[in-house]
Image: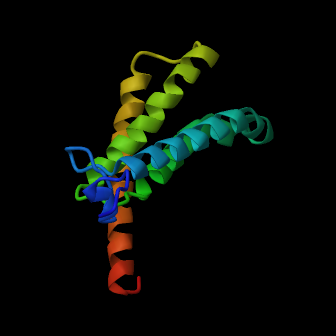
């Protein structure tokens, strides 16, 4: 008889999920990936504005969409990829939100729920897309 510290689920090789069917490890990795992209994009925004003012004006929007897509794409072992992607993207936004309030007095009251809605939409779409791509790869289909 084995006296391993791991439970029967861990020994079986499956991942622990929350009650909503979210792969917690993949969710955590996605949140940190999205957070990193958001922080790097915010640091590069002044450079983009100095080089090309029209691009600098929309740079943060492009960065946010890319970060939310990047965060939500890798869904892991979940039965609800849209929910996983949306939660992951929203989590990355929630992590970076205190930094936005600290560094900018220009955050308007309508900007927070609007960006959260974009995070949920883009993250959900990216989660679904990532799930389809992964399912095709497991079946051996070509794009």
- Left/right placement of residue 84 relative to residue 93 reads left
Drawn side of residue 97 relative to residue 16, left or right? right
Query: In this orientation, which residue lies closer to the viewer: 9 or 142?
Result: 9
Q: Nearer the viewer, residue 95 or 56?
A: 95
Q: Residue furthest front?
A: 1
Q: Taking the image as drawn, is residue 120 in sight? A: yes
Q: Is residue 38 above or below residue 22?
A: above
Q: Residue at x 62, y 40 (%)?
A: 59
Q: Nearer the viewer, residue 44 or 17?
A: 17
Quarter holding residue 12: bottom left
Q: Is residue 99 left or right of residue 70?
A: right
Quarter of the picture holding the N terminus: bottom left
Camera-nearest residue between 132 and 114: 132
Residue at the spot x=24%, y=55% of the render? 80
Determine the residue positioned at 33% across, 57% down: 10
Would you place residue 108 above or below residue 41 in this image?
above
Q: Is residue 112 left or right of residue 8?
A: right
Give x and y (percent) for residue 64. Answer: 52, 41
Where in the figure is residue 43, as x and y percent of width and height? 70, 34
**Residue appearing at x 46%, y 33% in the figure:** 93
User: Is 91 situated above or below 104?
Assistant: below
Whether residue 58 is visible to the viewer of this picture, yes or no, is no
Query: Percent x, y for residue 50?
Result: 79, 35
Q: How many marks can you see?
A: 0
Picture quarter containing residue 77?
bottom left
Task: Name, please, the residue furthest toward the left.
Answer: 19
């Amino acid at each position: 008889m084995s006296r391993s510290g791991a439970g029967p689920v861990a020994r079986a090789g499956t991942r622990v999920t929350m009650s909503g069917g979210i792969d917690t490890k993949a969710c955590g990795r996605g949140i940190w990936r999205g957070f990193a992209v958001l922080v790097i994009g915010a640091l590069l925004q002044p450079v983009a504005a100095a080089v090309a003012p029209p691009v600098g004006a929309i740079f943060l929007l492009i960065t946010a969409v890319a970060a939310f897509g990047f965060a939500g794409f890798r869904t892991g072992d979940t039965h609800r990829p849209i929910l996983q992607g949306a939660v992951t993207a929203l989590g990355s936004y929630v992590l970076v939100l205190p930094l936005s309030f600290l560094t900018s007095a220009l955050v308007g009251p309508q900007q927070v729920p609007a960006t959260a809605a974009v995070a949920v939409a883009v993250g959900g779409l990216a989660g679904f897309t990532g799930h389809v791509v992964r399912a095709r790869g497991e079946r051996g289909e070509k794009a």
